[in-house]
Image: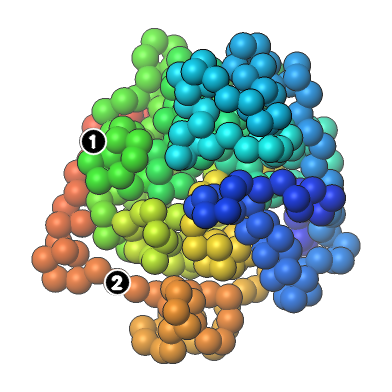
């Protein structure tokens, strides 16, 4: 058996009280469900896995990207105050409500991500997973899409500032617009995002034609997927575009967002992936042999999300999550996209005219990158 990576998982046991208001789709409690699964599977307590307690990001750390005025408004909002100025920066909307502990939760999530980045930079771990990280919609001075502080950007900037060659791989169902906008001109960071097309889902962008400019031309790679895409379509695009670019770029470290809102049955997305695909993609990234900072991102069916994270994280760490029913079509559904017998989802497939339309769109996007971004990276169009 191959040696396990030195892995760590960021925990929030002392702050279970910090959560979004009742009824909000984003539930940080998913992280505790994940820990329960890992405990049940016998992973917690293994010598190769450390549990590290999240530490809130400091003001200076947050201000590496966010403006002082915006951070001040976050602190006021966390004390229950409301103002017109807050509304102008997205605070107090249905997506980004104002609630007690808002700033503490945002700072803690960002601090957990930065803790992981520091551990990787200091070679204290090979894989670090912050399940409450991945707030990729937040901007420099505004909240958006459930996101108040962009920890993805903070981690990428921190690692780049240390002289690291950074690759950001975003596999959330929603395009990481905040991350892209922040880093679009930064030639120190490769930005890649696979997501449902902006034609059918918020935030409405993330099209393949935005590839960066100047010194960063070719360092912004979007792979929009049509609604209904399944594991086959996702993995064809991932192997056909993302992996060749990552291989050519040769990062020192990877920041990987594995949003489980890509899964079939998620209430906010329209893809039909199973956790087999997300685990395979995460394992391929880990196969580059570089340190990986894993962030949870979205996922609005809590149980499916926690289970998908567990499968991806365990797979990256070389833990077998297969069972006797893996790969079968059919079986007993349990009211979500899971099935009786293990952590792995039953595979689902598009067919007929829908299959043909999905395949045509995926091939179109792959062909665009083969013709446009591959030459920038010196990649043969036959790669992948």
Decide which of 74, 383 is in the foreground and name it: 74
Nearest the viewer among 40 and 368 is: 40
Residue at left 75%, top 19%?
59
Residue beneath disc 2: 349
Q: Does dot 1 land on a helix, a strand or a loop?
A: helix
Q: Residues within 10 Å of mark 2 (few under 14, many from 20)?
A: some
Residue 123 visible from this viewpoint:
no
Is residue 45 depicted above or below 324 in this figure?
above
Task: Name which residue lies at 58% across and 41% down.
Answer: 134
Is residue 151 toward the left or the right of residue 171 in the image? right
Q: Position of residue 242 (x, y in %)?
A: 42, 42
- Look at 16% across and 64% down and name the residue there: 354
- Can you tell which mark lies on residue 368? 1
Image position of 216 with respect to 364: above or below: above
Instruction: Give the spatial CA distance, label 2 vs label 1.
Output: 25 Å
Residue in the foreground of this view, choosing between 121 and 173: 173
- Residue 322 quadrant: bottom right
Judge whether 87 appears above or below 198 on screen: above
Quarter of the image with the N terminus is: bottom right
């Amino acid at each position: 058996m191959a040696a396990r990576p030195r892995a760590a998982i960021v925990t929030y046991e002392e702050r279970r009280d910090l959560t979004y208001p009742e009824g909000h789709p984003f539930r940080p409690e998913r992280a505790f469900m994940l820990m329960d699964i890992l405990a049940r599977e016998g992973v917690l307590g293994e010598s190769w896995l450390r549990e590290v307690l999240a530490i809130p990001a400091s003001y200076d750390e947050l201000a590496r990207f966010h403006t002082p005025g915006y951070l001040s408004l976050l602190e006021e909002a966390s004390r229950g105050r409301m103002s017109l100025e807050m509304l102008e920066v997205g605070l107090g909307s249905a997506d980004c409500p104002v609630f007690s502990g808002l700033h503490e939760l945002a700072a803690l999530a960002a601090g957990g991500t930065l803790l992981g980045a520091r551990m990787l930079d200091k070679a204290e771990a090979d894989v670090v997973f912050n399940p409450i990280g991945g707030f990729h919609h937040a901007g420099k001075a505004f909240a958006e899409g459930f996101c108040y502080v962009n920890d993805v950007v903070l981690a990428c900037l921190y690692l780049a500032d240390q002289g690291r060659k950074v690759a950001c791989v975003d596999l959330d169902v929603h395009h990481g617009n905040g991350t892209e906008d922040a880093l679009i001109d930064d030639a120190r960071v490769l930005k890649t995002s696979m997501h449902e097309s902006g034609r059918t889902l918020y935030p409405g962008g993330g099209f393949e034609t935005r590839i960066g400019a100047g010194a960063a031309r070719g360092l912004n790679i979007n792979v929009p997927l049509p609604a209904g895409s399944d594991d086959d379509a996702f993995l064809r695009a991932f192997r056909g575009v993302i992996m060749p670019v990552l291989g050519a770029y040769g990062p020192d470290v990877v920041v990987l967002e594995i949003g489980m809102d890509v899964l079939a049955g998620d209430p906010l997305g329209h893809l039909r992936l199973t956790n087999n695909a997300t685990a395979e993609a995460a394992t391929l990234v880990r196969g580059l042999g570089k340190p990986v900072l894993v962030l949870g991102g979205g996922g609005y069916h809590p149980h499916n999300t926690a289970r998908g994270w567990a499968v991806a994280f365990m797979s990256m760490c070389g833990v077998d999550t297969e069972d006797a029913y893996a790969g079968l079509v059919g079986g007993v559904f349990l009211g979500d996209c899971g099935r009786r017998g293990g952590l792995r989802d039953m595979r689902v497939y598009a067919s007929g005219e829908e299959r043909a339309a999905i395949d045509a769109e995926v091939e179109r996007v792959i062909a665009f990158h083969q013709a446009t971004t591959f030459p920038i990276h010196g990649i043969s169009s036959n790669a992948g």
